[in-house]
Structures are given as structure tokens and as C-alpha cells.
Amino acid sequence: MRPADDLGTDHSSPEPADETIDRRAFLQRGLSLGGAAALAGVGLDSRAEVSLPPWMTQPGKPFSNYGQPSPHEKATIRWISSNAAVPGNGISWTPLHNLEGMITPNGLHFERHHNGVPQIDPARHRLYLHGLVGRPLSLGVEDLLRYPMVSRLCFIECGGNSNTGWNQEPVQAAAGNLHGLVSCSEWTGVPLAVVLDESGLLPEAEWLVAEGADAAAMNVSIPVSAALDDALLALYQNGERLRPENGYPLRLVIPGWEGVLNVKWLRRLQAATQPVMARNETAKYTELLPSGKARQFTFVMDAKSLITSPSPGSHLTTPGHYPITGLAWSGRGVIKRVEISTDGGKTWAEASLQQPVLPQCWTRFRLPWRWDGSPAILKSRATDETGYVQPERATLVAGRGRHGYFHYNAIVSWAVTREGSIEHVYA
Amino acid sequence: MSMRKAGKALSLAIALGVATEWAYGRAEGPQLGRTLSPQEIDSIGINVFPDGSGLPPGGGTAAQGQAVYEGKCASCHGPKGLGGSAEELAGGQHSLTSDAPDKTVGIYWPYATTIFDFVRRSMPLDAPRSLSDDEVYAVTAYLLFLNGIIDRDREMNAQSLPKLEMPNRHGFISIFELEQTR
């Protein structure tokens, strides 16, 4: 289903592509260039002696119980932004600019905590179901581990992701530190519908009020229709049990819906006829419009994409070949198309979508690009299966104003300077 | 299945094969849940709804709440609900259509019951669940008083709190509902 105010417009097939990103042209020229480079390489290196690296002349380190990244990858970390007075209240960002593929490593999944990460003993954790049910239930984690499970690859995105985009001036930061409140994992757990079925959900139940076992006892209301559709009681993240910061031992996963609804440390579900109107569905996670009215229960995360490489922090050293790659996702289904512009949106070329392309999941896109050394503006634009097209920033701001704070999904523009550095711009 | 994600059922079925049977609730669970007693439900059920259901016995006034606020809230939220390190709760000057809208309790929050629900479960951050129900009622009353919604001596309790109509009660559009009915 298309979004209610549908700022994403249909548009016809891509306009004629800029020739520097025409794939066939690139491949032909790339091949001939590659051949020349290979010949030059033979000439330069033929008399040099290759010395053995030290790691080939002595035994390596022994086994480890739990592997860690290479010490050379120390820059690939979550960037933390928390309240100095209350360190457990804040966020940390997934370093999208340092990652590839479509899966976020568990230690780099973004975080949003309202009052710290609870250290939960799974033996003492229970899931309670009550309210409008035939039989109120209490289930232990060991019980849930014996229920039928499914796995689901999907993104989780904070409703507040990318919100500096509402600022008047573009903020200069790495791509992940602007847009990294989104991550993608394989979540495995029990379909919520199975447990609701056992508790005998009553027909008048329209909402489930979910609550976490953290120090904020964070609560939000979720429509029963979503719970019965594909919501998961997730126990595993990318094959291992959930990380504490991602809800250990149990979290709700509602594919494609805003992060706050994917309640971590899930402790309680109360079935009700009405939403609870919690602080985090009224005062927060609502989007004030220019009219003074605010959008509420904006559950679905609309289509979005961004180029993760090249991106701010990258440096293009010489003119030549630089692959463009990035991520696209939509809470409304599969990504149908991602287009790339290198001239600020005048012309667009279609990127290739790397398989698998799954609903409510990150889709990796790629396009070869030849930088000719002149200034360029790189953009990506996603279209999902409903026909919704990711809007330009001006369109989004015209429709929503600048005080909505949440659900910013406009096209991202990176300017390549003549020197080869990358800047965040509004263009 | 709901209309919400009808379009993706087929692709999901292909991706998950037979396991998809479970994804839509047709699988039988092993019935391992223990039935909750009414006493257990009472002790865990802290949701407070806009119609007042879930509110406990007890009550408090702004006059009583001021002491609670000054002792346990003001260090982060400022002496009168603004000017602290935490978000502004009162004293908003700019309307929701201004260039710098203040999303304070009096200007933005649609329900008074939300204050009770949130304060009881989450506040203060360094000692959540430490306030008595009377203290939560009192500090709720004080915040309503600071926002000019009630008088200093009006008691907030399970009857009076849900009856208050907040200034921004009709300020929200349910996008979920809008999309369901289109």
C-alpha cells in the first residue's frame, strides 16, 4: 500500500544516462584500460623481488572462543551519541560507510536505548500475555525455544534515522553517522501469531501494548493485524542469541515498521481495544506538520536509499574507475529499482540490484562509474514495489515542513569536489 | 492475512518454503505457557489508557507534587519544567505552527493519562519505579499545573485525570487508520 500523503511520485523510465555511468560503454572502455594497465604492471614489476611477509615465516596465533575483527579494522565501530547526564539514554550508529553486503554484524547493529541496556538473566525472564485473551499466559525463554520458529531477513530502522536532514544546512559527517540508525539482520524466532493463538486472542482485541523489561519499561501500541501478519518473537540474531543491546533474550520484530515498535527485552503484551497512547507514540515518534497537526502511528518506514561508497570520508585520488554502491530498503515491500545520478539529478542510470532482493530488507545496489576529475553530485533514488519513488529533499520538506523530526527519507546528495573529497550537500 | 503486506506473501513463501505455514499462525504451538493468575496480572499490569483504565487508587495535587518534582525531577528538567538537560515539559512559548514549536505537555501532549503512565514506569531515570502511586499522581498534577491546565489544589486521581481534555487532544492524524481505510 502506498503511503497516505504519497510524496514519492511515479515517474517514467530513466532518462538517458550520463555517459560516464553507461554500463556498456564503461565495460568496453574499462576492458581496454585494464589491458593497458596489466601490460604496464608487467613492465614495472618484472625485476623486483617479492619479500615474504612476516606472517608467513612464523606460526600464527592460536584459536579463539569468540572471534574478533582484525586490529586493523579499529575504525569500523558504532559512533555513540548519548546524553552526557544519562549515558544510557541515546543512540549509536551503524558505520554504513565501512560495511559491505546486506547483513549488519551483530556488534555493529545500531542502538537506541531509553535507559540503558538491561543485563537480563534469561532464567528469570518471562513473557506475559494478558488483557483481551481467553487465557492469560506466562512463558519462559526455555519454553519459547521449544516453539516452531522461522527466520526472516529484514531491516530495522529507527523512526528518527537521518533526522539531521531536516536541518537548514547539510551536516558534514560520515554516511553511517547521518543515516546509520538502520541495520539488517537475519532474525529467528517464534511467529507471534502462534503464541497469540494459544492465548485465545479475543475478536475485540485491536491493539497489543508491548512493554520491555528495561529500566524505562518502554511501551508502545501495535495493531493486532500486524502482530498476526508477520511479527516475530525473535530469539536469535544472525544465528546467535540476541545481543543484550538488541533485546536479549527476546525482542519483537515487525518487518518494515519503525524501530521503536520492535520492542527489545520484550516482557509483556496486553491485548486491548485501544492504543495506550504512550509517551513514545504521542509526545515522541509523531511528526508535526506545517498545519500544526501531527502524523501519528506512522508505522511503515518508506522507501529510502543512500550511496555508502564513495561517501564523505572517501577520497578519490585520481580520475578513473570508482564503483558506486549503496543500500536501498522499503517497509512496503521489495525494492524494484535504484537509479544513480552523478550530475545532481539531471540524468539517471539504473543500478544493478544484488541478489537476493527481499521484502522489507536491505538491497545492495552497484554501478560502475568513471570519475573524470570534475565536480560531480552523486545521488541514489529508490523505487519500491508499490511504485513509490524516494522523494527529493525539497519535495519532502514542502510536504512535511521541517519540524516532523521523524521519518526523513529524502534522496541523499554527495558532492565530489575537484580535489576528490566528498561533501554532504542539498542539491 | 491483513491487507498490510498482502503483496509480499508470495515472495516470502518462496523464500521460506514450508516454514511460511508458521509465519501466518497456522502452526500449532506446544502449549507450554502457564496460566497467569489475576493477582499476577495486577502486579505487572501498569499500562494506563486514555479512558483511565489501569489507573490505581490514590491521588495527589500540584501543591504536593511540587516537592516531589523539586526533589527528583528538577535536576534534569529544570526548576519549572524547562531549562534543564532533559526535554522541556512546561513553559512553552511557541505554538505548533511557529518556526520553533515547543512540544511541551501543555502544547503537544494529547492525553493527561500519558504523564502518569510514563512517569510511573520510567521516571526518575536514576531510580525508576521508586515513586509511590500518590507521588506519581502529585507530580502529574504539578506538571499539569505548570502548563496552566489545572489549579494548584485540584486533586488528580483515577476519576479526574482521564476527564481532563488536553489542549492538543485533537492534534493528531492516525496515518495507520488513514491507510487502512483508503
Image (cartoon, coloured by chain):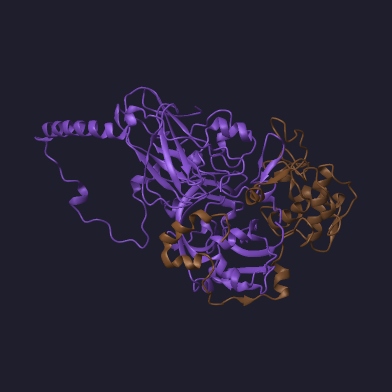
Task: Determine the colour of chain A.
Answer: purple
Q: Please say whether residue A239 is visible from this viewpoint.
A: no
Residue A223 horizontal/vertical position (percent): 64, 57
What residue lies at 70% left-to-right and 73% top-to-bottom? B40
When the figure is inspected, residue A114 is found, relative to residue A132, above or below; the finding is above
Asked where in the image residue A5 lies, by quadrant, the reply is top right
Residue A399 horizontal/vertical position (percent): 62, 34
What residue lies at 74% left-to-right and 45% top-to-bottom? B109
Residue A324 horizontal/vertical position (percent): 36, 36
Task: Determine the colour of chain B.
Answer: brown
When the figure is inspected, residue A345 is found, relative to residue A361, above or below; the finding is above
* Residue B149 placement, left or right of A339: right
Asked where in the image residue B98 lies, by quadrant, the reply is top right
Residue A53 horizontal/vertical position (percent): 19, 46
Q: Nearer the viewer, residue B80 or A256?
A: A256
Residue sitting farthest toward the left: A47
* Residue A413 placement, left or right of A399: left
Q: Nearer the viewer, residue B112 or A124?
A: B112
What residue lies at 68% left-to-right and 67% top-to-bottom? A203
Q: Please say whether residue A366 is visible from this viewpoint.
A: yes
* Residue B110 placement, left or right of B62: left
State the count of labels: 0
Q: Nearer the viewer, residue B72 or B122?
A: B122
